[in-house]
Amino acid sequence: MEDYGGSDDEYCYYDDDQEEPMDGIENEDSDVLGSARKDSTTKVITKESLFDAQREDLRRVMELLSLREHHARTLLIYYRWDVEKLLSVLVEKGKAYLYSNAGVMVDDHLNSNIRRCSSSSVSCEICMEDVPADNATRMDCGHCFCNDCWTGHFIVKINEGQSRRIRCMAHKCHAICDEAVVRNLVSKRHPDLAEKFERFLLESYIEDNKMVKWCPSAPHCGNAIRVEEDEVCEVQCSCGLQFCFSCLSSTHSPCSCLMWELWIKKCRDESETVNWITVHTKPCPKCHKPVEKNGGCNLVACVCGQAFCWLCGGATGRDHTWSSIAGHSCGRYKEDAEKKTERAKRDLYRYMHYHNRYKAHTDSFKLENNLEETIKGRVTISEQRESALRDFSWVINGLNRLFRSRRVLSYSYPFAFYMFGDELFDEEMTKEEREIKQNLFEDQQQQLEANVEKLSKVLEEPFDQYSDDKIMEMRMHVINLSVVTDNLCNKMYECIENDLLGSLQRGTHNIAPYKSKGIEKASELSTCWSNKASDASNYLPSDDISSGGTTILKRDRPSGSGSSSNDNINECSLSKRTRKEVSGFFDLNMPAEVIDRN
């Protein structure tokens, strides 16, 4: 059997008595590139669970501050659904400051079901007409206007995209209108707009929440992802798409989002083509087209017929000797032009160095993905043989480790291109500091690259044709190489976070943390449906706000600290229940702008 790893100094081996590192590899999840785990910190929010996810935060604020639902939603939308920030403002500034900033006017004496103005008739200050009290509505702020003016105001705001925070019509009044009133009045004239308003309120939990984002899959899978801790992370949706939660692009760690954005732009646009033209061609002084020299003579001619000097680019005649061009001399040194050309050539070669290695490892990753089916076929053949060896999970785990390490190695080259270049950190490191840090990083990068290639070579072995002793020897090499590559990846991330980015712009260049078991697959948020009639009424259409066959969800009701709604939460089992399709739900299978276009 071939030598898989060179000397013992390059990576360590573990014998059968050292079970801990082996178990760390053999007990990995077998799903390729990410799997759902019991302690998942990311959740998938589907159209069925979106309502429950929103109510979780709503109930928390309602019970803490003894507010009605629309007041709690107004607060949460203003503070971007950050309950901790809301509570922090409450403790530091007080309740009055909290309410006034968000436009919440709490009137304990105002019955939410009776919003008629006190007198028998009302003079509307908007249309300047007297209307019966039955045709006027008073908001929490105390302003009372006719229903026609309110409805027109609501329709305009909804069409303008301001559904989440519709302010009172009164001059200099910053109070937010009651969503139940908006829903009731608009549904009588435009049921479709009332549905749109309801959808915007629901989707505000995603659109205004920095910890929740739509999955960027195309076509859209209809899911949103919620993270519990750090928003700078990489996640995998239940549809299988892996992406960076911070910038919604493809996974790119250890590159920061800004580095990856610049790298993608550099690879896609024609900036490097321009660099090549600058280095290898010169513009014709007459037609300004780029001309490439294909001979040794420094007198060149453009297709337009103009002759010029290759050395300086100046127009000349066609007469020349072996040593000079007739009537032309350009022997004087011009520093600026020479420096510009040399810098363009240096930048081009530097980019090609990093891009070629990035492309090589990306191509290797794609080819190794094809290796998966081959390895699974070999495992099937090996398991069918009459042999004492039945467990080949170490092969699949080793393949998963290869995928993860290859991905890290591939993205480490764009990181190095910007980390040690002049574009981002030119003024934050001296030349000596940059050289020290670059040597430190490249040493670790080379160690990782060497072990990844060794692991790739071992996994390509036709182990289905080997004897049991040879398979056991190969097993030891795969396990040891997997442990070493995992440790090297972890050390590279520590080097980047502590030694390279630690003293620089961490706020701009945060990177997603390294996870040994791969990108975490988000688990589905469990939905809880109570069987109580009182709770079920929240999902039934309200008689006074449905019209024209369109169902509007009744969701606003008074709730205080003594409300029985808290009992409904406690009765909800933590285990995932069977989801039910509730009649009247509008389609939340894609973002609002997509629905509107359809």
Image (cartoon, rainbow, N blue to C red):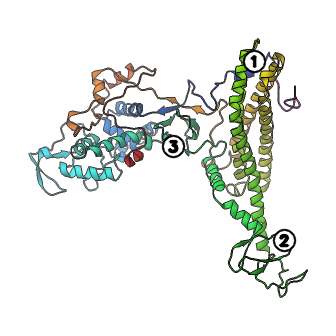
The residue labelled by disc 2 is 295
Measured from the top left, where is residue 407 in percent x and y?
69, 39
**If you read the primary sequence from the N terminus, does the residue marked by circle 2 or circle 1 appear first?**
1
Q: CA distance from mark 2 to mark 3?
A: 51 Å
Compared with residue 63, is residue 211 higher up or lower down, i.e. above or below? below
Confirm whether the magenta stretch covers residue 6.
yes
Q: Total of numbered circles in the picture?
A: 3
The residue labelled by disc 1 is 19
Closer to the camera, 318 or 89? 318
Residue 475 visible, this angle: no
| Amino acid of disc 3 | Ala
For the record, the magenta segment spans: 1-13
Residue at 45% in and 21% down: 574
Measured from the top left, where is residue 461 in percent x and y?
80, 28
Closer to the camera, 564 or 22? 22
Q: CA distance from mark 2 to mark 1?
A: 68 Å
Residue 390 shown left or right of residue 203 in the figure: right
The residue labelled by disc 3 is 218
Closer to the camera, 487 or 90? 487
